[in-house]
Image (cartoon, grey):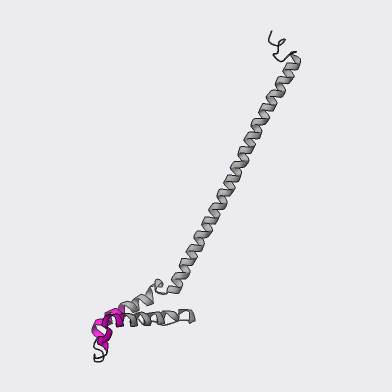
Amino acid sequence: MPIIANNMTEGRIPFAFLEDIHQRFVKTYGRAIHPAPAYAMNDEFSRVLSQQMDHYSNDPNADRLNRSKDEMRVTASLELLVDKTATLQEIQSASESRLAVSKILFDGEMVAMVLIIYRVLAFFCRGLLLPSCLK
């Protein structure tokens, strides 16, 4: 299962694999590699090689750049969602304000209509207490 770069953008994956293997090998064996005969660590380290080859060949998260791009896409989507939510809240607030203003105006119009009706009745009933209409 060799790691092969299909195009230029995937060329970084083999180098990431090689860097990872190098770091793991040096961390595991350190200075013991200098006096060791050739292939002395082959049996032990072949499992690590196999696991890492599988990881870098099959795991999409092995490519840090693509993983970072995916995280940036998610972040951008979240920002867009937050912006849309804020816009919806502003629209809702504006419509609630319009509704409140309409209610106040309607209540004011009702009061004005009642006053007009009272004035008309007061005129026809000859007085503010409506004396001729209440008899």
Question: In percent of the image, x 34 and y 83: which residue is there?
Answer: 22
Residue beneath the point at 31% across and 80% down: 24
> Residue 17: horizontal and vertical position, in percent?
37, 80
Number of marks in the image? 0
- Position of 90 relative to 130 (above/below): below
Residue 61: x and y, percent?
A: 40, 71
* Residue at the limit of the structure toward the top, as seen here: 135
Instruction: State the image quarter where residue 47 is shown.
Output: bottom left
Give the residue at x 70% y 23%: 115
Quarter that holds the N terminus: bottom left
Give the camera-side residue of 1 and 11.
11
Q: Is residue 60 left or right of residue 51?
A: right
Q: Tell me what residue is drawn at x 38 percent, y 74 percent.
A: 58
Q: Which residues are magenta?
A: 24-50
Q: Residue furthest front?
A: 31
Would residue 87 be found to the left or right of residue 64 on screen?
Answer: right
Q: Main secondary structure of the magenta part?
A: helix
Asked if residue 104 is among those painted magenta in the image, a careful observer would answer: no
131 over 85 or under it: above or below: above
**Image vertical order of residue 59 relative to residue 75, above or below:** below
Q: Who is closer to the viewer here, 37 or 26?
A: 26
Above or below 54: residue 78? above
Question: How far across and down, in percent of the image, does residue 133 sit?
Answer: 71, 11
Q: Give how far across and how far down residue 39 sits, in percent.
A: 26, 89
Query: Which of the image's four quarters has the C terminus?
Result: top right
Q: Quadrant of residue 125?
A: top right
